[in-house]
Image (spheres, rainbow, N blue to C red):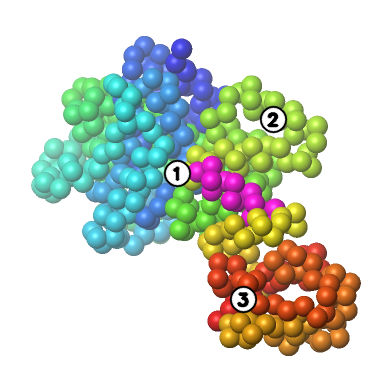
Amino acid sequence: MKKNFVAELKWRGMLQDAMPGTEDLLNKEMVTGYIGFDPTADSLGVGNLVQIMTLLHFQEAGHKPIALIGGATGMVGDPSGKSQERNLLSEEILNHNLACQKKQLEKFLNFNSGENSAEIVNNYDWFKNFSFLDFIRDVGKHITVNYMMAKDSVQSRLESGMSFTEFSYQLVQGYDFYWLWKNKKVKLQMGGSDQWGNIVTGTELIRRKDSGEAFAIVTPLIKKADGTKFGKTESGNVWLDPNRTSPYQFYQFWLNSSDADAKTYIRIFTLLTKEEIETLEHDHNEAPHLRTLQKALAKEVTCRVHSEHDFNAAVEASEILFGEGTTDALKKLSERDLLAAFEGVPQVEISRAELEAGINVVDFFSDKTKICPSKGEARKMIQASGVSVNKMKMSDVASSITQDHLLNGKYILAQKGKKNYYLVKAG
C-alpha cells in the first residue's frame, strides 16, 4: 500500500497550500512532479532538505519525482524573499555548482525503481537555444504585466527597485513548468511557500498557451520556535557538503535543537513513522534531560545525509568534548573530526623538535603552552590530577610529553579542570 502523499505532508506539518483538485489527481493516478533547486552555491543546505524530503515522500507515495537544477534560472536570480538583487554567477561557477548539487541529490532519491524512477534535469538544456525574441513572442505575450506586478516577490521590491532581469524570472520559471508539462508529462510543481507566485505563473502559462491543466503544492517556510531563521548557526549556513559543514558540526546542529524545534524537525526531516515519533515524544516528555527527540533526530538526519560511520564518529567526538570519551576514542578521530569537535578551542603551537626530546609535563603546561601561568600552579594542578593530556590524567610531575602523544601526527589535546580544553599543535 503506497502512502497518501497529501495526508503524509499534512501530519508532518509540511503542507502550506495546494491548488484545488491536486489531492484528487494524486489519489487517482501516478503523477510526475518536480521541484527546482537554485545553484547559487556548490552545496545544498539544510533548508533544501525540506524539498528533498518532499520529493522523497512523493516517490514513496508511488509518484515520479524530478529534481530540476536551474542552470538557466541560476543565471537570472530569483527575487522571491530577497530584499536586493544578488550578484550573477559566471557560467564556470554555475556549472561547478550544478555538478556538485546533482551529486548530492543522487544520494536521496531512487533512480532505479521502474516507472517512478527519479530524474534530474537542467533547464539550461531547453533555454540555451531559445532566443530572446522567440521567448517574448512565445511566452511573454501570454502573461500580462498586471499579472506579474501583482506577485508578492515584485510588490515587496517596488520601492527599492528591481531589474528587468529579476522581474522576468517568474516567466522563466513559468516556462520551465510549461516545458516539463509538454515534454515530460509533469502535472505538479512543488516548492516552498515563497515560490507560490512563480509556480502559479507556470500553471497559468500552461492554461493560456495550450489550454492545459497543472497543479501546485507548497510547503511552509521553516523557522525556529524563537522566530529566527532556520539553517544558520553563529558560524553561518549549515551545508550538506562535509567539506563545508563537517559531519560533527552537522550532527551538533540537530542535537542542539530546542524541544519545540525538535518536535517540528523530526516530522519534516526524517522518515520515521507517526507511531515511532509519538513514542519518542512520550519518552522525551518522561525524561526531557535525556534529549531523546534530539538524539533520534540527529541520528536519522546525519546517517541519511552523510553515513552511519560519520554519525558514530560525531557521537564519539561529542563524548570526548563533553568529558565522557576515552583516549582510544580520541585516537580514532580523523583530523577533520578532531578539528571540528574542538573548533573555537584555544590553539597553541610548540616545537616538534622539543617533543622528540621530550618535554617535562610541568614545563609543557607552564612555559611551553602557558596553559598554567606559572610552574608552581602547573605542579599543583598535576599533583591534584587537575590536568589531562589526550584524556589521560597527568599526576606525576616527573613524566614527559613526547611525540608519541601526537594525535594524527600533529596535535595534543590538553585539558585543565573539567571544561578548559587547548589544542596544542606541533610545528
Residue drawn at (45%, 58%) of the image: 243
Q: Which of 106 and 26 is in front in this view?
A: 106
Span colored in magenta: 307-321
Residue 351 is situated, as x and y percent measured from the top left of the image, at 60, 85
**What numbered label is drawn on residue 403?**
3
Q: Tell me the residue that label 2 is attached to.
A: 280
Of the 4 image quadrants, the one containing the C terminus is bottom right
Q: Is mark 1 on a helix, strand or loop?
A: helix
Residue 187 is situated, as x and y percent measured from the top left of the image, at 30, 24
The residue type indicated by label 2 comes to Leu
Q: Nearer the viewer, residue 102 or 129?
A: 102
Residue drawn at (75%, 54%) of the image: 324
The residue type indicated by label 3 comes to Gln
Residue 368 is situated, as x and y percent measured from the top left of the image, at 69, 85
Magenta stretch secondary structure, dominant: helix
* Callout 1 crowding tier (Cα within 10 Å): few <14, some 14–19, many ≥20: some
Q: Which of marks 1 and 2 is in front?
A: 2
| Of pointers 3 and 2, the one earlier in the residue sequence | 2
The residue type indicated by label 1 comes to Asn
Q: Which of marks 1 and 3 is in front?
A: 3
Q: Which of 278 and 383 is in front in this view?
A: 383
Above or below: residue 43 compared with residue 425: above
Q: Nearer the viewer, residue 275 or 408?
A: 408
